[in-house]
Image (cartoon, helix red, strand yellow):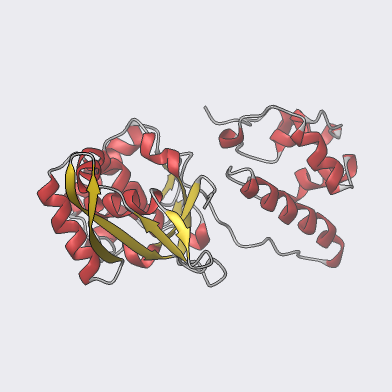
Amino acid sequence: MFLMNYRIISKDSLLKLTHKEAFVFCCIVLNTDLENDGKIYISHIKEETLAKMAECTSRTIVTYIKKFKQLGLLDIKTEKIKGELGVFDRNTYSIKIPDSNLGENWFRLNYDFLKEEISSDMKGFLLLLKCLGINGSNTVLYSLDKIGKQKLLHVGLNKIKELTRLGISLQVISKAKTGYVITDKFIYEDLPEQKADSPTEQLLVDYYNRIVSYCKRQEMKPPKYDKELMKIIFNNCPNFEFFVDKMNNRNYPKEKISNLMYFIKTLNFDIPESNEKAKDDCIIMT
C-alpha cells in the first residue's frame, strides 16, 4: 500500500531505548508498509541492511531487535523463503501505529531523515531529544544537566553534552534562551490547533489551522501562528481555496519555510507599512 513519506513514531517506545537503539527502531519503522486498515506498520527489512544503516554489526542488530520484542515495541514472525540462492529466513516486523488523535505521545518523521549526512549516533540522539519537545514542538525546555540528572533519556550526561555540541556544530540543534531547539528539517513539529483569544480572531485562527493542514499534506513543517501576519494573509486572500490554488501553482522549498511571511512574499500580498520591518526579517532557513 502507498504511504506518505513520513511515519508516526511513538515517543513512549523511543524513551525506553538508548540513542543507538532508537535509531535502529526508527529505521525499521521508516521501511514499512501499512496493513490491518492502516493500524499496523509491516517491515521485511534485513538485519544486514539495518547493520549498514546503523554502522554496527549484525550481532548488535539481533540484540537490539530482541530487546524491542521484549519491551513489546514490535512483534516478529520468521519464515523460510526460497530464493535464487537457496532458502533463507525472512523476518516480518509488525509495529502498532500510535493513534495521532490521542494526546502528544507521537511525532512524524520523514523518510529522508535517513539520508541526512550525519552519524547514526547523532540521528538517534535527535530522535530522543524530540521526545522531550514541549506540546509536539521541536523545543526542549530542559537543561542538559536536568536531562542527565533526572535520567529523562537512557544516555549518560557526558554523551548528552557531547552530542548536543556536535548537533549545534552541524546546525541540526540550536541553543535557545531556555533549552534547545531541534532544527533538522525532517523532524516535523506537530503543534496542537491554535485557539482564538476572542471571537473576532476566530476567522484568523480557522484560516491558520487550514494552512497547517495544507502544510502537513505537502509534507512540510507548518509555520508558527502569528496574529499580525495572519491578518495580512486573510485581508489579501480571504478565500482559503484561492490561497491553495495560488500555492499549488508555485514551486517553493517545502521543507524550508520558517514562518507565515514566506506565504505573504511568495504570493506578493500587500503589506501594511507598519509591517514592513517584518518583511525584511529572515524568512527561509538556510
Image quadrant assignment for residue 55: top left
Percent position (x, y) of residue 221?
58, 44
Image point (23%, 39%), residue name:
84
Percent position (x, y) of residue 64?
18, 57
Image mark count:
0
Image point (65%, 40%), residue name:
259
Image quadrant assignment for residue 154: bottom left
Would you place residue 161 above or below residue 71 in this image?
above
Image quadrant assignment for residue 249: top right
Left or right position of 35 against 241:
left
Task: Identify which residue, 252 or 4, lies in the foreground.
Answer: 4
State whether residue 13 appears in this view: yes
Task: Identify which residue, 107 or 60, lies in the foreground.
Answer: 60
Image point (33%, 38%), residue name:
167
Image point (51%, 48%), residue name:
188
Would you place residue 286 above or below residue 177 in this image?
above
Task: Identify which residue, 183 or 98, lies in the foreground.
Answer: 98
Left or right position of 260 against 284:
right
Percent position (x, y) of residue 58?
14, 46
Left or right position of 188 against 248:
left
Percent position (x, y) of residue 267?
80, 31
